[in-house]
Image (tube, rainbow, N blue to C red):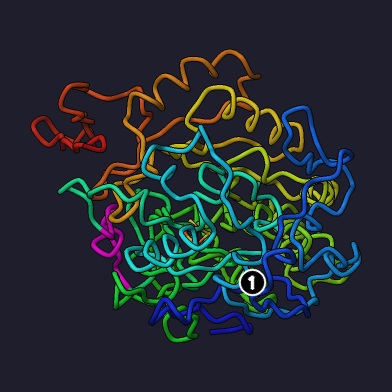
Amino acid sequence: MFGSHLATRLARPSSLRYSWCLSHTSSHTRKSSSENRLVKPSPDHESSGGVLDVTRREPYWHIIPTWKDVSEADFLDYGWQESKDKLAAFLYNVLPEEIPYDGDAPEPLRQIQTRDMFVQDVLGGISLAPMSIRITPHIMSVIDWTKPLSDPIRRQFIPLRSSFIKDHPKLQLDSLNETGDSPTPGLVHRYHDKALFLAVSVCPVYCRFCTRSYSVGGATEEVSTKKSFSPTRRRWERMFEYIEQTPQLSDIVVSGGDGYYIAPEHLTSITERLLSIPHIRRIRIASKGLAVCPSRIITPGDGWTQALINASAAARRMGKSVALHTHFNHPREVTWITRLAAQKLYEEGVMVRNQTVMLRGVNDNVDTMKELMRLLADNNLMPYYVYQGDMVSGVEDLRTPLSTILEVERHIRGSIAGFATPNFVVDLPGGGGKRLATSYNTYDRSTGVSTYILPGKNAGEDRVYEYHDPL
Ligand code: SF4
């Protein structure tokens, strides 16, 4: 791969590591209980809800004991190189010895009463997870460590064995059948005029619910082999040739993995090559980077950010577009650093759209989703999609029934300007593509089975796709 960030293979729980997109110099060794105490937010840090107000220009990462002396300049510096550290040691450092009672946590999790029990539960969770662990300092800093059992950010990235729910029998690792729709490895052509260019298989974080669990990140105990899309010129060349020879294509999503991990010079060469193809009109760079490591965007001279800005400007001159598609799921992911980064991209003319995934215990309620959509719109990160969770193996505790997204949309549509209201969609399992969640043909709430019809060109060619709620 290009770049220095290697996916972390978690062979044994004892060797668990997470990696940063920013590095730090502290050693995370296990400390005495008095040293391990959680640093409480100062009154200045607290909002009325008792949670860090990460939108104020304050060092919110000081909540992590080993980072309490890290300066703003260091935290903002993307060159604060990547390092790796042991997740278990980090948790011992950041968690209180006794886990506070958390009435918001599901019942099985409330049995976790000590730090030791929490760490053991995490190790057990990782052994069942389809995704390996990678988390950025930004994300670690916005987790509310006084409520680790129910915290919505923790739920997205760190699994707990006690929260696991048996998979629905219809779940699959490649639930969208991307490999089945790939004319050449890493190029998914499902829609008439759009294709997905999977450039890399690595990301700055690994989301537990990733729809591409079959390919992204390192192998795990549960998924011992992944279909890796390594960034080789030969593979990319075959993808470019297919695109060049398919004039119906006008829209290319460059993804992975995550576009943040495409080396700047390769981001430039990919966008230049695609823009030079006459029938390609639109390119989207898919990256969660802005949501999980926003400091990179405002790091002076950062090559990746400049490559994105240059590509966006070049496309505009050609009457085409290069946009960034990012992925925020919870309002607390938007800090003052995020705002600065979003403003920079806005001033530079880079269109940014956001794709959220609806997740149980994260954003599956009207208030959180509405707050997130407003926050994104206020920062010119235009809400584009809210996805129903895909039917991916191993993360049933995060999936909601279809009825939840229908209810959330019912309350949000009409309460926010139309152009800032996302489409609430189901990406149909088996490769049916995205459909408005409300456009189901049938939905039996007692069995949890919904059907969607994909119209065929001729009578009798309609195809029916099923979505199944969690059991
Ligand atoms: S950043 Fe995107 S591709 Fe990477 S793990 Fe998360 S959802 Fe999957």
Is 430 or 447 nearer to us in this picture? 447
Is 13 or 321 nearer to us in this picture? 13
Using residue 272 as the reference point, say whether residue 412 is left or right of it. Answer: left
Residue stretch rendered in magenta on the structure: 173-184
Amino acid at the residue labelled 1? Leu
Up the image or down, 470 lies above or below 174; here it is above
Q: Measured from the top left, where is residue 349 in percent x and y?
A: 79, 48
Q: Residue at x 23, y 56 (%)?
A: 172
Is 90 or 171 nearer to us in this picture? 90
Is 175 in the magenta? yes
* The C terminus: image quadrant: top left
Q: Quadrant of residue 258?
A: bottom right
Instruction: Give the dominant element type of the magenta stretch: helix, strand or loop.
Output: loop
> How many numbered dots are placed on residues in this image?
1
Q: Helix, strand or loop at disc 1?
A: helix
Q: Residue at x 56, y 57 (%)?
A: 286
Q: Residue at x 86, y 54 (%)?
A: 59
Q: Residue at x 67, y 65 (%)?
A: 33
Q: Measured from the top left, where is residue 388 in percent x and y?
A: 39, 37
Is 231 in the magenta? no
Give the crowd class for mark 1: few <14, some 14-19, many >=20 residues within 10 Å.
many
Residue for badge 1: 267
Q: Quadrant of residue 73?
A: bottom right
Using residue 307 as the reference point, say whether residue 220 is left or right of it. Answer: left
Is 159 or 357 nearer to us in this picture? 159
